[in-house]
Amino acid sequence: MQQFLPQNQQHITPLMEYFTNPGDQDPNLQHFVSIAFRQNEEADRTNMDALESHFICEILGADWYDASGLSIERCTIDEANKICKQVVKNLQAESSSTEAFLINLSALAGGPLMTKLRMTKLEQGSIAHYECYWKMRFGSIEGDFTIRATIHHGLEPAALEHGLEDSEEAWKKRYLDLQQQIRERDEKTGRLKRGVLDALVAANMYASV
């Protein structure tokens, strides 16, 4: 993949290398941040659907290009779901630890620090290669992120049994449901932020009296 996909930056650090090397630390430096990780034994899907829905939305809304840099049509919902799952699998497989995997996922989520996603696609028969590229910025600090995934396109057993149209309709419904969940979450977060700001303004006004 690296020989045909255009490079968007002069220097690329693989995403999996972030947070793997703590570097030299001053033993006399006072630490203000403490982060602890644990692996819960019980299996659950906490935040999994939310992250997948967020990244699927980012993929569907991304700018799409072929290996030559020409603009192409965006992918289908089913294709976006496969890309999302493969990217998460790649992150988990290549992260040096559970801690690194969780931190890498936070970069994938991005939030307001994340610029619009750029997707590059190369098809080779039944195999498609994808490159996901985006930036994150915080003031003068800027980071470039690139994740690659390879998908083997073929008819899934469910698609063979029920037909491609039914499969696509099912994904459309799930996508719309996920969009609604994200919209409700954003509205709830927005109300919470406005409440906090209103409380701060009221407190400052009261203090100045």
Image (cartoon, rainbow, N blue to C red):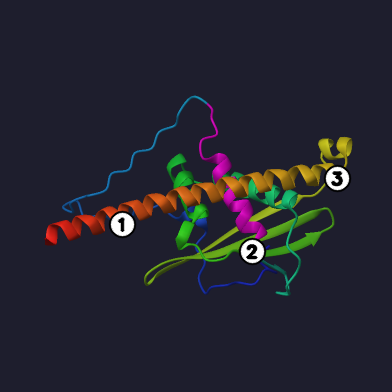
Which mark sits nearer the N-terminus, 1 or 2? Answer: 2
Residues drawn in magenta: 43-62
Split into 4 quadrants, where in the image is the C terminus? bottom left
Q: Are marks 1 and 2 in contact (CB under 8 Å)?
A: no
Name, please, the residue furthest toward the left. 209
Magenta highlight: main SS: helix
Number of the front mark, 1 or 2: 1
Where 5 falls versus 105 (above or below)? below
Residue 197 tag number: 1
Number of other residues with Cα within 10 Å of mark 3, as a class: few under 14, some 14 to 19, many 20 or more: some
Quarter of the view holding residue 157: top right
Quick one: 178 or 49, which is closer to the camera? 178
* Residue at 21% over, 50% down: 31
Number of other residues with Cα within 10 Å of mark 1, as a class: few under 14, some 14 to 19, many 20 or more: few
Question: In this figure, which residue is indicated by the disc labeled 2?
Answer: 62
Where 100 falls versus 198 (above or below)? above
In the rendered structure, which amino acid carries the disc numbered 2?
Ala
Judged left or right of residue 6, residue 190 is left
97 in magenta: no
Q: Are marks 3 and 1 in contact (CB under 8 Å)?
A: no
Residue 114 at x, y = what percent?
49, 62
